[in-house]
Image: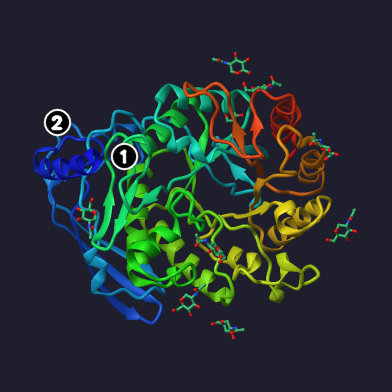
C-alpha cells in the first residue's frame, strides 16, 4: 500500500517542510461551543507553525524563503444547526500535503460570481453578465495522465464550453492500488487522505490545467450513489445508511474535514467556478427539512472558509407538494426528500441546479421542456441563477440530437437559465484511448458534437443579456 506509506512519510517530515506549497495542513484542535440553538462559535487553535499563509488576493501568495515562521490563532464564527460532539476530533486527516507537482493559484483570471446587475446570471470574466454553456466530465479527476488533462481541457476550451463539472470526491474503504485514483480511505479508525500520485495530486492537476487552459471547474464533495465511494463508503466505515448520513455526527465531521481540505487548498484559484455539496443528494422518504437543514449548515460552513467562490447543492431539482407545481407525479411528489424551491431559498446557496433524465424517470422526452420551464420560473421568483446542470436522452449512443436539441432551444429561447451543461463530454484522444463513457456521452469526434456542443455553446455566448 504505497499510498498510505507515503502518508506516514509526509506526516513525519511535516515540521521540516515549511516551504511546501500549499502550506502544510494545519493540525487543528477544534473547540466547539454552542452559543444559541442554531448558532455556534468555532474556535480553531492552530497548533502547527507554518510560513505566512498565502493571500488569496494575489498570485504572490506563495510562501517565500524569507517569510517568517509564525503561529496563528484564528477564530471562525459561523451559524449551524449541526450538533457536534467529542467524536469530531477523533477523525482528523492524519497526513499532510507534499509539494504539488502542479502549480495552481497562479492564474490572474477573474473569479466567477453572481452578476450584481443581473442576479439571474453569472459574471464569468469580470466583464459583466453573460449566458454560456458548460459540460460534465466526472472522470477528469480520476485519470492518471497529465497530458490527457491537457487534451481534455483544450478540447472543451476550443468548443467554447466555459465550465466543466468534475468529481471532487473519490472514497474507498480499502486501498485499490496505484492504478485507481482515490482521495479518501474511510474505515472504522478514521479518514485517511491519499496524497500519493493517485490521490490529491490528481485534483491539483485538474485545477492546474483548468487554470492554464482557461476553463473553470465545479467540484463536489460526496456522491449519493456508491460509484467512486460516496455515502455508502461512509456508511461502511462509520455506520448508518443513505438517509441517516445527513445527520450522523461522525460522517458529517469527516465530510466537513474533507470539505475543509479541498476548499482551503483551492480557494485561491479562479479556475474553481463553484463548490458543490454533493452529486444528486437524496434522502428517500425523509421530510424535506433534513436536506434543507444539512444544505444550510454545510453551505454556511463553506462560506466561512471561502467567501469568494459560489456554492451550489448539486441536486436533481425535485419539487415537493409544498411548491404547488406539477401533477403530483414522481418529480413533484417529494419522495426523495428534496424541495428545489425551499433549498434555493438558502442564503448561502448562490445558484440552483437541476438535472434531466426523462428516460430514467418514466417521463416522456417532450416533458423535458416543461421541467426546464418550471425551474426557470422558480429562479425568476427567487431572483437567483438556475442551471440545467446535467441532461441526457435517449440512452442510445451517438443519437441525442432529436431529443436534446429541443431542450437546448427551450433553454436558449424561452428561459433565463444562466447555463446548461450536457452530460457528458467524451473524447477518443486520451493516451488510454476512450475516456470513461456511458450511453449519454457526446463524443468529441461524433457528428452530433457539432450541433449539441459547438453550435449550442456559441449560441449561448451570443444570447443577448
Ligand atoms: C471569458 O474570456 C475568454 C477569453 O477571452 C473567452 O474565451 C470566454 O468566452 C469568456 N467567457 C465568458 C463567459 O464571457
Ligand atoms: C484504516 O486504514 C488505515 C490506513 O490504511 C490503517 O492504518 C488502519 O489500520 C485501518 N484501520 C482499520 C480498523 O482497519
Ligand atoms: C436507516 O436507518 C434508520 C435508523 O436506524 C431507519 O429508521 C431507516 O429505516 C433506515 N433506512 C433504510 C433505507 O434502511
Ligand atoms: C441514493 O439515494 C437514494 C434515495 O435516497 C437511495 O435509495 C440510495 O441508496 C442512495 N445511494 C446510496 C449509495 O446510498
Ligand atoms: C417536516 O419538518 C417541518 C420542519 O421541521 C415540520 O414543520 C413539518 O411538520 C414536517 N412535516 C412532516 C410531514 O412531518
Ligand atoms: C408527455 O407527458 C406529459 C405529462 O408528463 C403529457 O402531458 C404529454 O401529453 C406527453 N406527451 C406525449 C407526446 O406523450
Ligand atoms: C435515434 O433517435 C431517433 C429519435 O429519437 C429514433 O427514432 C431512432 O430509432 C434512433 N436510432 C438509433 C439507431 O438508436
Ligand atoms: C482528437 O480527435 C479529433 C476528432 O476525432 C481529431 O480530429 C484530432 O486529430 C484528435 N487530436 C489528437 C491530438 O489526436
Ligand atoms: C469516433 O471515434 C470512435 C472510436 O475511435 C469511432 O468508433 C467512431 O466511429 C468515431 N466517430 C466518428 C463520427 O468519427
Give the quadrant of residue 377.
bottom right
Q: Left or right: where does residue 421 sit relative to residue 259?
A: right
Q: Quadrant of ligand 1?
A: top right
In the rendered image, which residue does mark 1 sit on? 177
Q: Quadrant of the N terminus?
A: top left
**Rendered view: 169 above or below 40:** above
What residue do we see at 33% from left, 40% from top?
199
Nearest the viewer among 337 and 235 is 235
What residue do we see at 38% from left, 39% from top?
181
Nearest the viewer among 339 and 33 is 339
Label 2 beta carbon less than 8 Å to ligand 2: no
**Rendered view: 42 above or below 50:** below
Q: Picture coordinates of residue 16 (x, y %)?
A: 9, 38
Q: Residues within 10 Å of mark 1 (few under 14, many from 20)?
A: few
Q: Left or right: where does residue 295 sit relative to residue 64?
A: right
Q: Secondary structure at mark 2?
A: loop
> Which comes sooner in the sequence, label 2 or label 1?
2
What residue do we see at 68% from left, 40% from top?
131
The answer to whether residue 123 is visible is: yes
Q: Secondary structure at mark 1?
A: loop
Q: Left or right: where does residue 119 sit relative to residue 330?
A: left
C-alpha separation, residue under disc 2 versus residue under disc 1: 36 Å
Q: Left or right: where does residue 442 sit relative to residue 31?
A: right
Q: Which mark is residue 133?
A: none
Q: Picture coordinates of residue 23 (x, y %)?
A: 22, 41
In the rendered image, which residue does mark 2 sit on? 65
Q: Picture coordinates of residue 357 (x, y %)?
A: 70, 51
Amino acid at each position: 500500500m504505497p499510498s498510505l506509506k507515503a502518508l506516514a512519510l509526509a506526516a513525519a517530515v511535516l515540521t521540516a517542510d515549511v516551504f511546501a506549497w500549499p502550506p502544510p495542513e494545519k493540525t487543528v484542535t477544534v473547540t466547539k461551543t454552542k452559543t444559541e440553538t442554531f448558532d455556534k462559535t468555532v474556535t480553531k487553535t492552530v497548533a502547527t507553525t507554518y510560513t505566512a499563509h498565502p493571500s488569496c488576493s494575489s498570485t504572490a501568495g506563495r510562501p517565500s524563503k524569507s517569510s517568517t515562521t509564525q503561529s496563528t490563532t484564528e477564530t471562525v464564527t459561523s451559524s449551524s444547526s449541526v450538533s457536534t460532539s467529542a467524536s469530531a476530533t477523533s477523525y482528523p486527516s492524519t497526513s499532510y500535503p507534499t509539494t504539488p507537482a502542479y502549480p495552481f493559484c497562479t492564474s490572474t483570471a477573474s473569479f466567477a460570481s453572481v452578476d450584481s446587475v443581473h442576479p439571474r446570471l453569472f459574471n464569468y470574466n469580470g466583464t459583466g453578465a453573460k449566458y454560456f454553456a458548460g459540460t460534465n466530465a466526472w472522470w477528469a479527476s480520476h485519470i492518471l495522465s497529465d497530458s490527457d488533462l491537457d487534451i481534455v481541457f483544450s478540447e472543451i476550451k476550443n468548443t467554447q464550453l466555459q465550465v466543466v463539472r468534475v468529481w471532487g470526491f473519490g472514497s474507498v474503504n480499502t486501498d485499490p492500488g496505484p492504478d485507481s485514483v482515490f482521495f479518501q480511505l474511510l474505515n472504522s479508525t478514521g479518514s485517511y487522505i491519499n496524497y500519493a500520485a493517485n490521490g490529491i495530486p490528481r485534483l491539483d492537476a485538474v485545477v492546474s490545467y483548468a487554470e492554464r487552459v482557461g476553463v473553470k471547474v465545479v467540484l463536489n464533495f460526496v456522491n449519493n450513489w456508491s460509484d467512486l465511494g460516496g455515502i455508502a463508503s461512509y456508511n461502511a466505515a462509520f455506520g448508518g445508511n443513505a438517509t441517516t448520513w445527513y445527520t450522523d455526527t461522525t460522517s458529517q465531521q469527516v465530510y466537513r474535514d474533507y470539505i475543509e481540505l479541498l476548499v482551503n487548498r483551492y480557494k485561491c484559484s479562479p479556475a474553481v467556478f463553484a463548490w458543490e455539496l454533493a452529486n444528486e443528494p437524496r434522502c428517500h422518504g425523509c421530510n424535506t427539512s433534513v436536506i434543507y437543514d444539512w444544505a444550510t449548515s454545510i453551505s454556511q460552513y463553506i462560506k466561512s472558509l471561502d467567501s469568494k467562490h459560489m456554492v451550489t447543492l448539486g441536486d436533481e431539482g425535485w419539487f415537493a407538494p409544498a411548491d404547488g407545481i406539477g401533477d403530483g407525479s414522481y418529480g413533484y411528489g417529494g419522495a426523495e426528500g428534496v424541495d428545489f424551491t425551499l433549498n434555493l431559498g438558502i442564503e448561502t446557496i448562490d445558484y440552483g441546479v437541476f438535472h434531466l433524465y426523462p428516460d430514467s424517470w418514466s417521463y416522456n422526452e417532450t416533458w423535458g421542456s416543461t421541467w426546464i420551464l418550471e425551474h426557470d420560473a422558480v429562479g425568476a421568483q427567487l431572483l437567483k441563477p438556475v442551471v440545467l446542470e446535467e441532461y441526457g436522452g435517449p440512452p442510445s449512443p451517438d443519437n441525442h440530437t432529436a431529443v436534446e436539441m429541443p431542450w437546448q432551444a427551450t433553454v436558449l429561447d424561452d428561459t433565463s437559465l444562466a447555463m446548461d451543461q450536457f452530460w457528458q463530454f467524451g473524447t477518443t484522444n486520451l493516451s488510454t484511448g476512450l475516456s470513461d463513457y456511458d450511453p449519454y456521452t457526446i463524443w468529441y469526434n461524433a457528428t452530433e458534437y457539432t450541433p449539441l456542443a459547438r453550435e449550442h455553446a456559441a449560441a449561448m455566448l451570443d444570447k443577448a443579456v
